[in-house]
Amino acid sequence: MKPLLGNLTTLLGDEYKKLTGVRKQAAFLRDELSAMQALLEKMELMDKLDPSANNRRDHVREMSYDMENCIDVFMHEIDGVDAKTGFVKKMAKRLRRLGRRHQIANRMEELKKQLKVVSIVGFRGLGKTTLAKQVYDGIGGQFDRKAFVSVSQRPDVKSLLLGLQRKLGMEESSHAHELQEIVDCVREYLKHKRYFILVDDLWDQQAWDIISCAFPENSNGSRVVVTTRIDEVALWACHSDRANIYRMKQLEEQDSRILFVNRVFGPGNVCPPQFKEISDEILKKCGGLPLAIITIASLVASHEPRTLREWECIKNSLGSKFATKPTLEEMRGILNLSYMHLPVRLRPCFLYLGMYPEDSEIMRDDLVRQWIVEGLIYSSL
């Protein structure tokens, strides 16, 4: 941190006194970093740090590297003008650098914000939600508040934000009835907290514009992860910062085979020789999509005893174009195949799930009671 603080002090010197905006930003960053340096020095004396402190220490270190690069570039731009150059040429160079300086000033502004939005984008069935949920479960404990919300294609944003309130542990407000009031309540609640929000299955920019208003850009290192199938939405959520976009890809052949075998024969087992050729053919038709592989693997695993004839029927039931051009229609075909192989008594239970709104949480006991009322299952009591 010391070299960085030295550069910031230089930016506050007489040589740069005309750069009022830069001096103001540099003064802010110097004061912030001085406090951070004192904290890091205190941490060095501790025998053991908890995961949250470890994470914050690493975050401060990474941010200091970004700041140092930003300031080095800026000072190079300013000092690069040759004093012997004629006045006209000097002014021309300064004008050409004006755009660059503006970008650098914007970067210094961004460094002051520690809120970060990351987008995960990819075709349906690639495992975007699974990946995001693993991150959410893995590091969620490092934040003061966390919440997982599903948006869906036609979201009721007001209901979504009310659900977010409950998941954040907020007390229900008696006066917040309008959408703007709910947004303001959530924003005020999160204002001084370090939070982690997972926004799953975002479909359009308009919904994000409303939802994101509830996320204050405080300086506590908060994080928002967005999953979406649409590139433009991923870019919009990240403010067009491509560095914060993670693109999901289809599984490689070897990874597809491991996933399939683990699901069918159990973790650590291998595919029997007589099933190897037919399983490879099935996997090719799954096109490397985890959802397709898991669905088909669960289907073949449910048939006992396993026979080549049964696997051949399943293979022939899959579309021929899926491996080269995975479309939503082909994916529906795989899910439909899985549905048709359900026992007849279970199909009405499965279809009853269509009574619930898309992406809504389904309470198990409530669902079972409704199955009983409809006569789909019988109570053992």
Image (cartoon, helix red, strand yellow):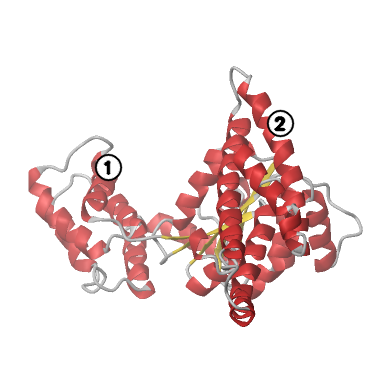
As rendered, which of 65 and 359 lies closer to the eye? 65
SS class, disc 1: helix
Q: Which residue is mark 2?
A: 38
SS class, disc 2: helix
Quarter of the figure with residue 161: bottom right
- Going by the image, does 215 lie left or right of 291? right
Q: For the residue carrying disc 1, how many other residues have a C-alpha within 10 Å: few (<14), some (14-19), or many (20+)?
A: some
Residue type at tag 1: Asn
Q: Are marks 1 and 2 in contact (CB under 8 Å)?
A: no
Q: Identify the image quadrant of the C terminus.
A: top right
- Residue 332 appearing in the image: yes
List the single residue furthest toward the front. Answer: 84
List the single residue furthest toward the left. Answer: 274
What x and y, as percent, mark residue 196?
Answer: 64, 48
Residue at figure coordinates x 66%, y 58% from the top left? 108
Residue at figure coordinates x 33%, y 53% from the top left? 294
What x and y, as percent, mark residue 189?
Answer: 81, 50
- Residue 168 appearing in the image: no
Residue type at tag 2: Ala
As rendered, which of 107 and 337 lies closer to the eye? 107
Q: Which residue is mark 1?
A: 262
As rendered, which of 213 and 286 lies closer to the eye? 213
